[in-house]
Image (cartoon, rainbow, N blue to C red):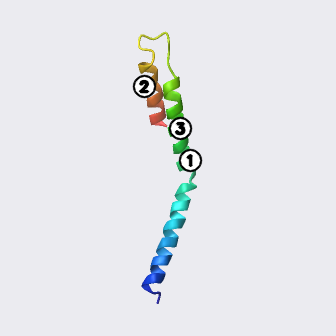
């Protein structure tokens, strides 16, 4: 029968493995990539021919990245 200390050590090891699995996840990397694209693309995208050149294109890019 394992002791209480052995159970805690096993739980900590399991938590560390789970945290490492989340850190290495492809879904997490994809999400971070989308957030980085949002930070880069929103300030750079605008249409000079529009009445409100920044607002409309910013909203469009924001909505597209939100759907992703």
* Cα gap from disc 2 to disc 3, whole angstroms: 17 Å
- Foreground: 59 or 12? 12
Q: Is residue 65 above or below residue 56?
A: below
- Picture coordinates of residue 4, whole percent (x, y): 42, 84
Q: Is residue 2 above or below residue 44?
A: below
- Picture coordinates of residue 9, whole percent (x, y): 49, 77
Element marked by disc 1 = helix
- Closer to the chain start, of discs 2 and 3, is 3
Q: Nearer the viewer, mark 2 or mark 3?
A: 3
Element marked by disc 3 = helix
- Mark 2 touching mark 3, by CB under 8 A? no
- Foreground: 36 or 21? 36
Could you say which disc has been placed on residue 36 in the image? 3
Q: Is residue 6 above or below residue 45?
A: below
- Closer to the chain start, of discs 1 and 2, is 1
Tell me the residue at 45%/30% (across/down): 62
Q: Residue furthest bottom?
A: 1
Q: Residues within 10 Å of mark 1 (few under 14, many from 20)?
A: few
Tell me the residue at 55%/61% (across/down): 20
Could you say which disc has been placed on residue 59 in the image? 2
Q: Which residue is mark 1?
A: 29
Q: Residues within 10 Å of mark 2 (few under 14, many from 20)?
A: few
* Cα gap from disc 1 to disc 2, whole angstroms: 24 Å
Q: Residues within 10 Å of mark 3 (few under 14, many from 20)?
A: few
């Amino acid at each position: 029968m394992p002791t209480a200390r052995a159970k805690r050590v096993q739980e900590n090891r399991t938590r560390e493995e789970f945290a490492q699995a989340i850190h290495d996840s492809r879904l997490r990397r994809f999400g971070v990539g989308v957030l980085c694209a949002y930070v880069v693309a929103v300030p750079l995208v605008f249409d000079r021919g529009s009445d409100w050149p920044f607002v409309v294109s910013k909203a469009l890019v924001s909505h597209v990245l939100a759907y992703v």
